[in-house]
Image (spheres, helix red, strand yellow):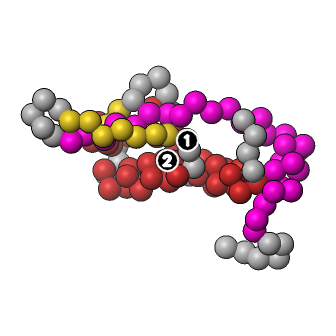
Amino acid sequence: MKLTGDDLVQVLATLANPHRVRVVAALVGERNYVSGLARQLGISRALLQVHLRKLEAAGLVTSQLEFSEDGKAMKFYEVTPFAFQLTPESVALAARTLTVEKGTQE
């Protein structure tokens, strides 16, 4: 998977948080809904949803809204298959496509 410089920065920044790394790990091999995932990870649903939104924005997870038999809405998340080869050369290639100007900070 080739990433632009901006994509690479977003993915690395997203995975720089231990909670988000744990979320991805928990979703490997099985999808889960917010409440179940929050219980599994021992964090609040509100905090989990913040992390899930960031993971989804980076393209690392996807979500799907489903309804249980009793009509309860449940949002399920699953990992999007990804593979990144992070080498000095791949970073150099990605850096050529960065849109953030030199000398600026976020």
Give the quadrant of residue 102. bottom right
Mark 2, residue position: 56
The magenta span reads 73-100
In the orientation shown, which residue stands out farthest toward the top? 29
Residue 82 falls within the magenta-colored stretch: yes
Say whether residue 26 is visible. Answer: no
Which residue lies at the image location 75% right of the left edge and 50% below the top edge?
4
Which residue lies at the image location 20% right of the left edge and 36% below the top edge?
67
The numbered disc on residue 31 is none
Q: Is residue 40 above or below residue 101?
A: above
Image coordinates for residue 10, horizontal then vertical, percent: 64, 54
Q: Residues within 10 Å of mark 2 (few under 14, many from 20)?
A: some
Q: In terms of secondary structure, where does tag 1 sit? A: loop
What residue type is disc 1 on? Leu
What residue type is disc 2 on? Glu
Q: Is residue 82 left or right of residue 47?
A: right
Q: Is residue 85 left or right of residue 22?
A: right
Q: 55 or 63, which is in the foreground?
A: 63
Mark 1, residue position: 60
